[in-house]
Amino acid sequence: MKQNILISGTGGQGVVSSGSFLSAALFRKGYEVMFGRSYGAEARGGSCRSEIMVSDTDINDLQFETSDILLCLSLPAFKKYQPLAKPGSLIIVDSSVLERVDAVREDVEIIPIPARETALRLGNQIVANMVMLGALAKRSDMVNLEYLKEAVETSMRPSMREINFKALAEGHGSI
């Protein structure tokens, strides 16, 4: 098994940190993991993406051309990266983004998640990324909620841990 996961959004939405947490959780589960990130020079407000290659065997080919799983937190990211999703792949997208899209592909599975709305209800819109990861943990056998929580426990500053745990749980329960 080898899968490419692309997390996309706008700078400041926690795209890079969510890629880091997901990579750590996948590694904890015993997978081989490669993690890369890309963001515009303007950082906040610019295009941002995290690329995670995960495999149960050695990863020798580092070309990330298409995704098996795509998480989208912003409309520009959805428009830009939806074409990279392989036919039959999974796209988890913030429902507020999907509401503003005219047409969606029919050869992929699209799951809308109220990530931003949930994050705002929890008190901080920055945790929308963790809502998305919680939904991914529910939908994919590759990663589970406990490994994501361990990654947050290990890498997140203490003052932000509780809200991130809640965001993961809310995302997990939204599917």
Image: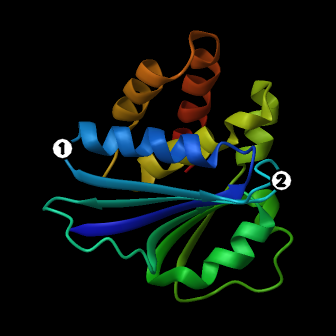
**Going from the N terminus, do you reach mark 1 or mark 2 first?**
1
Viewer-side residue, 165 vs 44: 44
Identify the residue at horizontal 40%, vertical 53% (top origin).
35
Identify the residue at horizontal 18%, vertical 44% (top origin).
30
> In the rendered structure, which amino acid carries the disc numbered 1?
Gly
Viewer-side residue, 174 vs 4: 4
Q: With respect to residue 46, does 122 lie above or below? A: above
Rendering coords of residue 9 (x, y %): 70, 58
Rendering coords of residue 175 (x, y %): 55, 51
Identify the residue at horizontal 44%, vertical 47% (top origin).
138
Q: With respect to residue 163, does 16 lie above or below? A: below
Q: Is residue 122 left or right of residue 166?
A: right
Residue 174 can be seen in this image: no
Identify the residue at horizontal 23%, vertical 41% (top origin).
29
SS class, disc 1: loop
State the residue position of label 2: 45
* Numbered marks: total: 2
Viewer-side residue, 53 vs 162: 53
> In the rendered structure, which amino acid carries the disc numbered 2?
Gly
Rendering coords of residue 69 (x, y %): 46, 67
SS class, disc 2: loop
Residue mark closest to the camera, 1 vs 2: 2
Viewer-side residue, 173 vs 52: 52
What number is the disc on residue 142? none
State the residue position of label 1: 30
Q: Residue furthest front?
A: 41
Q: Is residue 121 left or right of residue 78?
A: right
Q: Residue furthest right?
A: 100
Q: With respect to residue 9, does 19 lie above or below? A: above
Quadrant hosting residue 49: bottom right
Do the numbered discs 1 and 2 sit on residues whose CB atoms are within 8 Å? Answer: no
Quadrant hosting residue 14: top right
